[in-house]
Image (cartoon, rainbow, N blue to C red):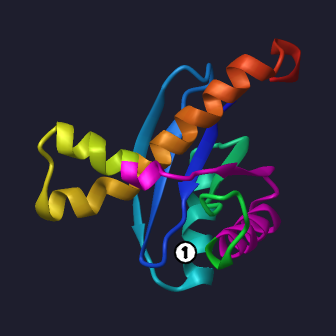
Amino acid sequence: MIIIAVDFGDARTGLAICDRSEMLASPIGVIAEKNFDLCMQKVAEQVKLRGAELIVVGYPKNMNGTIGERAELCRLFANGLQEMTGVPVELWDERCTTVSAHSYLNATNTYGKKRKAIVDAVAATIILESYMGFRKNNITTSEK
């Protein structure tokens, strides 16, 4: 199944996609858009263009597991995407993914403007890899 992951942000939204066999997650870019509705439309265009069958939106719970304002905004974004595309959307706990993305970029000596341009796509890839790992371990082949 082709899955697109979304790391929704106020100014930049990262996207990642996996292959049909769900073996490899890859970053596909960052949408630089501050307007909520326009960002949703641009993500929906990518979902349609790439033939995604499932959308996974990062759900930034607080470290204690509670739901804050940011998580509620991501829920609204996810609901809007599902309405706009007709593609099922799942929220996925994304605590610490941006921190992990920065760690990966540190390890590859990626800094400055280049780092800012890709950190959100790397975070989306981490979200997708985590979700794919869950599917691999918890969903039977017939459910995929």
Residue 38: horizontal and vertical position, in percent? 56, 80
Instruction: Give residue 68's position: percent from left, percent from top.
Output: 68, 74
Boundaries of the magenta span: 71-99
54 lies above or below 71: above
**Residue 10 position (above or below residue 128):** below
Which residue is located at x 70 percent, y 57 percent?
Answer: 65
Secondary structure type for disc 1: helix
Residue ranking furthest to the front = 64
Residue type beneath disc 1: Cys
Q: Which residue is mark 1?
A: 39
Q: Tell me the quarter of the picture where residue 37 sits.
A: bottom right
Q: Quadrant of residue 127?
A: top right
Which residue sits furthest bottom?
35
**In the image shown, does 118 or 73 lie closer to the viewer?**
73
Residue at image coords 33%, 55%: 119
**Crowd class of label 1 (few under 14; some 14 to 19; many from 20; radius 10 Å):** many
Asked whether residue 36 appears in the rendered view, the answer is yes
Determine whether 74 is above or below 55 in the image: below
Q: Is residue 35 left or right of residue 117?
A: right
Left/right placement of residue 17 relative to residue 12 reads right
Q: Is any part of residue 29 visible from this angle?
A: no
